[in-house]
């Protein structure tokens, strides 16, 4: 019998706290101090999250974000921009080794994809787990800086619309995969917050109505946060063959998260200048 | 898939090649295939010191962000900064142009604790198989 996983809902918090908690949970699980964890959370302010390597100055219209009241945060995981608002964000921290099968990157996406698919199917959505395929882009337009506009490996779609945007970070013994499951989506606002050539903005938004989905746009009856939380819990439990037990965030995790928030995720160096610049600034601080 | 016999390997899928008291480090052919197209490589500053298993950098592919781990302890004496503009070299030539750092080893004997090509190949086979 496998050890139970932890299930925890940390509620709607600010962007820096959300990312700091994701990293803290990964670090503590890597250290062997905590069980595998499925966390669900939300955002107290609409937030544009960027992938680890995205160039904030080039990709984000920071003035528009300020005007719109949209926070900007850089994730520890890769990928492209995601606008978080009315959604459930899932975050799973688990070992690199699975009990009963290979543990390649693709396999983790597949297993977690199956868990997410089970959750959405239980809510009545006709979701498909996408096989690897190339998405045809408008040939004269640049590639979209937005995550949901591209289908990649083992991702979930309803009628061709991507329902979940996920990203993964791998450490030595554990991984973090988190993702956005929108209940509602504001495509206009997303492309206002991103730097896109003005002549292509309307086209990106139009395309987004075809390629990006939200649960309550396709569900027969409105789905609540609670219903989606419970469906995720069941979906992960069934797919990984584990019991998910309510357990709180530990005091060590809170302490680490507060430290990471203050020194990293709440800083302009990390969010706007990028990981390398932040690391240099940390070294300068240490040498003082 | 290539597992050059003259290299040593880590379970985190880095390779190490000895050149005197220096060790050249990169990620393996298996790692670059698993990761898929690499879009970003973050390398350390020359001059910093690391212990074996410390993270020395980060690689991002279309599939994941992955930490990179130092196979031996020592000082970073070279970093392949071309990879900052051409991360795809890691996919195209993981053992050649895709090299990442050179470490001046503090204890060159640490290399002996790493996996041989045969051991690494067996480790990879296990990782890929259903158990």
Image (cartoon, coloured by chain):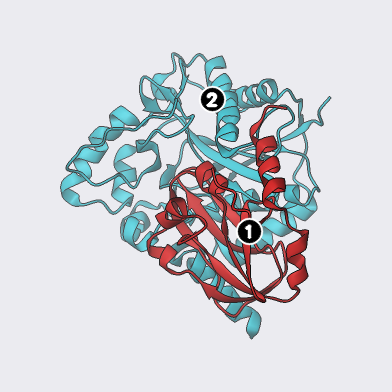
Chain colours: A cyan, B red
Residue in the foreground of this view, choosing between A255 and B127: B127
Instruction: Please give the name of the residue rendered at 29% of the width and 28% of the height, measured from the top-left corner.
Output: A210
Q: Are marks 2 and 1 in contact (CB under 8 Å)?
A: no
Q: Is residue B101 visible?
A: yes
| Left or right: B34 in relation to A103 | left
Q: Residues within 10 Å of mark 2 (few under 14, many from 20)?
A: few
Q: Residues within 10 Å of mark 1 (few under 14, many from 20)?
A: few
User: Which disc, if any, is residue A224?
Assistant: 2
Q: Quadrant of the N terminus of chain A?
A: top right
| Left or right: B17 in relation to A136 | right
Instruction: Please give the name of the residue rendered at 66% of the width and 64% of the height, measured from the top-left corner.
Output: B70
Element assignment for label 2: loop
Residue B79, compared with residue B63, is above or below; it is below
| Left or right: B5 in relation to A145 | right
- Given the image, what chain letter belongs to the residue carrying mark 1? B
| Left or right: B47 in relation to B74 | left
Instruction: Please give the name of the residue rendered at 53% of the width and 69% of the height, measured from the top-left corner.
Output: A278
Q: Which residue is mark 1?
A: B6
Q: Nearer the viewer, mark 2 or mark 1?
A: 1
């Amino acid at each position: 019998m496998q050890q139970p996983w932890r299930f925890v809902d940390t509620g709607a918090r600010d962007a820096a706290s959300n990312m700091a908690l994701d990293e803290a949970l990964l670090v503590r699980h890597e250290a062997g101090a905590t069980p595998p964890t499925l966390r669900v959370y939300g955002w107290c302010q609409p937030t544009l999250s960027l992938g680890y390597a995205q160039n904030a100055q080039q990709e984000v219209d920071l003035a528009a974000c300020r005007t719109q009241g949209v926070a900007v945060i850089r994730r520890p995981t890769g990928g492209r921009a995601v606008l978080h608002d009315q959604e459930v964000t899932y975050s799973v921290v688990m070992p690199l080794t699975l009990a009963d099968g290979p543990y390649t990157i693709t396999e983790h996406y597949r297993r977690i994809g199956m868990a997410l698919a089970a959750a959405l199917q239980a809510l009545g959505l006709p979701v498909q787990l996408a096989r690897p395929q190339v998405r045809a882009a408008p040939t004269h337009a640049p590639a979209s800086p937005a995550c949901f506009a591209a289908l990649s490996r083992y991702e979930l779609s309803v009628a061709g619309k991507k329902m979940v945007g996920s990203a993964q970070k791998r450490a030595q013994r554990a991984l973090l995969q988190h993702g956005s499951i929108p209940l509602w989506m504001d495509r206009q606002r997303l492309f206002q917050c991103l730097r896109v050539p003005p002549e292509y903005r309307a086209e990106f938004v139009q395309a987004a109505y075809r390629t990006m989905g939200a649960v309550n746009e396709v569900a027969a009856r409105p789905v609540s946060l609670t219903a989606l939380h419970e469906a995720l819990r069941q979906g992960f439990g069934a797919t990984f063959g584990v019991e998910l037990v309510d357990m709180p965030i530990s005091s060590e995790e809170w302490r680490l998260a507060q430290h990471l928030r203050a020194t990293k995720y709440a800083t302009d160096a990390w969010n706007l200048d990028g990981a390398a610049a932040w690391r240099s600034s940390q070294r300068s601080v240490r040498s003082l | 898939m290539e597992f050059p016999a003259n290299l040593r390997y880590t379970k985190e899928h880095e390779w190490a090649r000895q050149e005197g008291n220096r060790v050249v480090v990169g990620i393996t052919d298996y790692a670059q295939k698993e990761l898929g197209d690499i879009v970003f490589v973050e390398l350390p500053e020359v001059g910093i010191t690391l212990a074996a298993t410390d993270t020395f950098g980060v690689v991002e592919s279309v599939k994941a962000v992955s930490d990179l781990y130092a196979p031996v302890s020592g000082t970073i004496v070279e970093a392949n900064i071309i990879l900052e503009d051409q991360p795809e070299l890691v996919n195209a030539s993981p053992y050649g142009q895709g090299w990442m750092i050179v470490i001046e080893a503090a204890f060159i004997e640490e290399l002996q604790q790493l996996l041989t090509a045969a051991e690494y190949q067996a480790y990879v086979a296990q990782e890929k198989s259903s158990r």
